[in-house]
Amino acid sequence: MIPIDLADWLQQHLREGQAVNRQLHELLLQAVLQGRLAAGSKLPSSRWLAQQLGVSRNTVIDAYDNLRAQGCLDTRQGSGSYVAEVEREAPQLPPKPGRPKEAPALSKRGRLLLEQAGVSARQWGAFMPGVPDVTEFPVRTWLRLHNRRWREAQPERLSYAPGGGLPALRDALAEHLRGARSVQCTAEQIIVTSGSHQAVDLVARLLTDPGDTVWLEEPCYWGLRSTLQSLDLNLVAQAVDSEGLRWPTRPRGAMPRLVLATPSHQYPLGMVMSLARRQHLLEQCRSHGSWIVEDDYDSEFRFGTRPVASLQGLDGGDRVLYVGSFSKTLFPGLRLGYLVVPASLAPLFAKASAELYREGQLQQQATLADFIQQGHLGSHTRRMRTLYGRRREALLAAVHEQFGAQLPVLGDNAGLHLVLQLPADTDDCALETAAAAAGIAVRALSRYYSRPASVQRGLLLGYACVPEHKIGPAFQTLAGVIRQHCPHLATRKRS
């Protein structure tokens, strides 16, 4: 006898548009684990069941073979397949009416991470900040280099990366950074990472212990704050002014083990740290034994002035760990970045990186090395700087057309975004939500602050991934949303 009218039961539960062999295996496994098929029950022959279900015999054989491999079936020579004795699932009791479903048992730091998460579901379009125009990436050049590397691929290139990354890429990066950013380093001091988040994570894991004090800029990039919070560190926000991060005259509490700074282009406000402020920061960190993590965010894209030399170059590589990536210059999905560490730490960081992250992507790293060495990175960056400069001008013109001088603009001399300041009583988070409903992606400036007393209100507007002809109409839509939240602006005359 065929148990539980098996063919009819399976026929009722098979769904169209999905692989039948996989469904059949899952349904039979469910029947065994839930006791629908009792231990010792004989299954029908694969030929008979295939005919009843209207599928090929190989489909049923495949499902039976998978069950047999999982220990759910016993095969008796000349007799057929029987359900094996297996541990059954406990019956699932339906929840009582009105009883709330329990929340997942996350850790305290896990809940904190998700409560303060800043990641957006949308990563493209007007006016998403921090996103380059990936449609302008020289795909054909990259594919030519990439295909050549695959034609000559060696077994070790398909394995895990050596500590620190591919030597050819580290060589190319060292030469590029010395020329473009005045970074003082050798190839051995460079650790290839999967982006700035991983670089900062590695620094914090090797140079801090739980409870150590870390200073962050106020405001700062939420992603790095989240990375450090997850490591149980004592994060202290330090205000920035027109010259960048300020070392307090009378610091409170423990001296910092790490100081994170964006001296060449403060994120998100855009100011450049003055030379005097840089020298003072270096002196204080040397005096107190603190390390500086220099996040060289958006340093390649400056408009009207030359790129500012790195803080690491001024220091000589003694107290500064320099972080960069190719997310803005090439494309975010590449997931390649780098960390430049003092020479004394280089072998330790290379070994720890291999131990913690088990990196790979050696074919990508080899392609990127060729891309840099053959001059494609430099030419692409120059071309994009010109393109982004035009889009920046178009956005500034749109802001002036809609609001004149009523809403000041910050940080427009570099990078891929600008900050539109809003009146202090504006709920910029609500405005962000309303703009999203209108099809416009922006970020509320207040989200980048950790202390309510220091919050400024505004919107981050990215222009890099918006075609020039779409900037005016898109900002007109956004201006309508802004006026709904700041009605007094509508009555002011445009200058």
Image: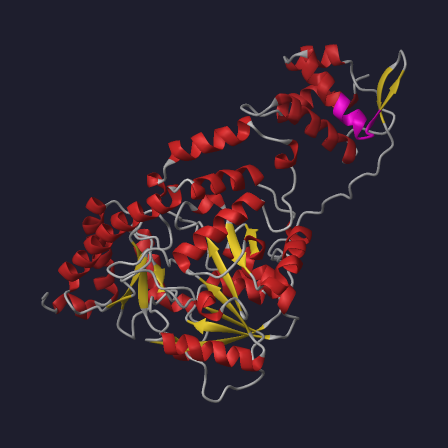
**Nearer the observer, 405 or 80:** 405
- The residue located at (27%, 69%) in the rendering is 422
Tell me, yes or no, if residue 116 can be seen here: no
Magenta residues (range): 65-73
Judge whether residue 242 is colored magenta: no
Residue drawn 71% across the image and 17% down it: 60
Query: Residue 175: x percent and y percent?
Result: 46, 51
Q: In this view, does 19 lie above or below 126?
A: above
Above or below: residue 63 compared with residue 487: above
Left or right for 134, reference 346: left
Q: In screen coordinates, is 275 left or right of 483?
A: right
Q: Position of residue 121 (x, y in %)?
A: 43, 50
Q: 60 left or right of 188?
A: right
Q: Residue at x 52, y 31 (%)?
A: 149
Whether residue 254 is situated above or below residue 95 in the rendered picture: below
Which of the pair 59/138 is nearer the observer?
Answer: 138
- The quarter of the image holding the N terminus is top right
| Residue 237: percent from left, percent from top | 48, 76
Q: Which quarter of the figure is the C terminus placed in? A: bottom left
In this rendering, position of residue 128 left or right of residue 157: left
On the image, which quarter does residue 265 sit in? bottom left
The chosen color scheme is secondary structure
Which of these two is toward me, 54 or 296?
Answer: 296
Is residue 71 found inside the magenta-colored segment of the image? Answer: yes
